[in-house]
Amino acid sequence: MASMNERAENRPRIRIRGFGFHFPGEPVEILTLPLTADEAKRLPRLGQQITHISTEDSTALMVHAGRDALRQCQIAPDDIRMVISAPSLITSYGLEIPAVAVRAALGSSKAECLNLAQGCVGVLRGIDLAVRLLAADPDRGDIMVVTSCRASSHTRNMNHGAFFWGDAAAAIVLTASQGPGLEVAGYSESSSNEDWGAMRIDFGDAPGGEPSADDHLIKVHFENAEAQINYVRGEQLHFAAVTDALLAQQGLTQQDIEAIFLPSTGKNRVPILFSEHRELLTRLQTDFRFAHFGGVDPIFAIRQYLERRQPPAGAWLMVASPAFAAQWGGLLFRTPA
């Protein structure tokens, strides 16, 4: 019987063939939004400066990013065997399968479709699922994972109480073929055992009263100060668990990680998250000047990093992202040796 290491050696290397992005319109300075005095006062602590606002729905944003990915990768639509969509927030039409719309718009007639509703972690889980499918059947074609965030339809002034959001989309093409590109080397997640967390979008089959103007807005509600403290502690514990699991999968230490990327949810949260991983804090490469674009953030941060510098051969890169208060997920990547 083959050992685990032998089976790992025999698996094809699954790599990112390329990225696609869509940031609608011109950049908007957050300070120019109609902020309250409290919102304006919090901006320096967050470090956020720029956002984007779209007039299109979240699925249309994914279509733009998917088209850009095909251009960047220089592949044909029929090279895509599956489209996995992972919207960061609820789609504009509620019950919707964005992967079907992306498939149709790209003309990827041979592609299967899957939609994951898992918040900002969904795109990371989608990448992991794509890796598993490609490893099991490497000769059928590439898989595209698309994500978007249209927070302007779910927030007030792009703000939900803790940080500022933006509208954007990203697409990743994964392949089992030979060539350059980041290898996907591991996935991990840590989920709450208690409840669904502090943030829920008021849409679905939950009993409710009379509709109001605030329906479907993202709201943060804590019953008391202790509940808010527990929320922060929960985030730190889940992030630490994901990080430790990713390091353990490859027998790595914090010193082995060349760069780590978080969502742009405010630089003020960083010291707490890294309280058990101080060495990794020195390797954080997220650009907190941008608003939070949901699941787009870690993909955008990696692309920015690769454009700014050439990491060493065989370097380890890590991304991690939360889904509301309920879950953290993370991916480990390696640059070509």
Image (tube, grey):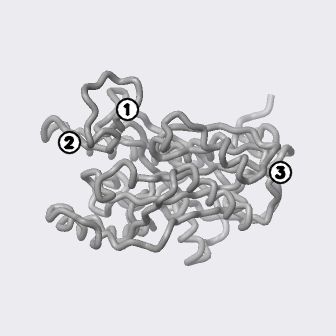
Residue to which mark 2 is pinned: 228
* Numbered disc 3: secondary structure: helix
Number of the front mark, 2 or 3: 3
Query: Nearer the viewer's eye, disc 1 or disc 3?
Result: 3
Give the crowd class for mark 2: few <14, some 14-19, many >=20 residues within 10 Å.
Answer: some
Whether 178 is drawn above or below 10: the answer is below
Q: Amino acid at mark 2?
A: Gln
> Where is residue 137, by image quadrant?
top right
User: In the shown orientation, is residue 49 left or right of residue 300?
Assistant: left
Residue that carries the numbered disc 3 in the rendered image: 78
Q: In the rendered structure, which disc, 2 or 3, sits on the residue that comes first in sequence?
A: 3
Query: Of residues 336 and 228, which is closer to you in this image?
Result: 228
Q: Residue at x 26, y 53 (%)?
A: 162
Q: Which quarter of the rendered picture does the N terminus lie within?
A: top right
Amino acid of disc 3: Asp
The residue where tag 1 is placed is 192
Question: Do the residues under discs 2 and 1 have CB atoms within 8 angstroms?
Answer: no
Mark 2 vs 3: CB contact within 8 A? no
Q: Is residue 297 visible?
A: no
Q: Position of residue 13 (x, y in %)?
A: 75, 51
Residue type (three-letter) at the residue carrying disc 1: Ser
Secondary structure under tag 1 reads: loop
Residue at the right extreme?
139
* Residue depicted at 15% across the width and 61% down the height: 38
Judge by depth and name the residue closer to the eye, 115 or 295. 115
Q: Earlier in the sequence, mark 1 or mark 3?
A: 3
Q: Considering only order in the chain, which callout, 1 or 2, is on the residue closer to the N terminus?
A: 1
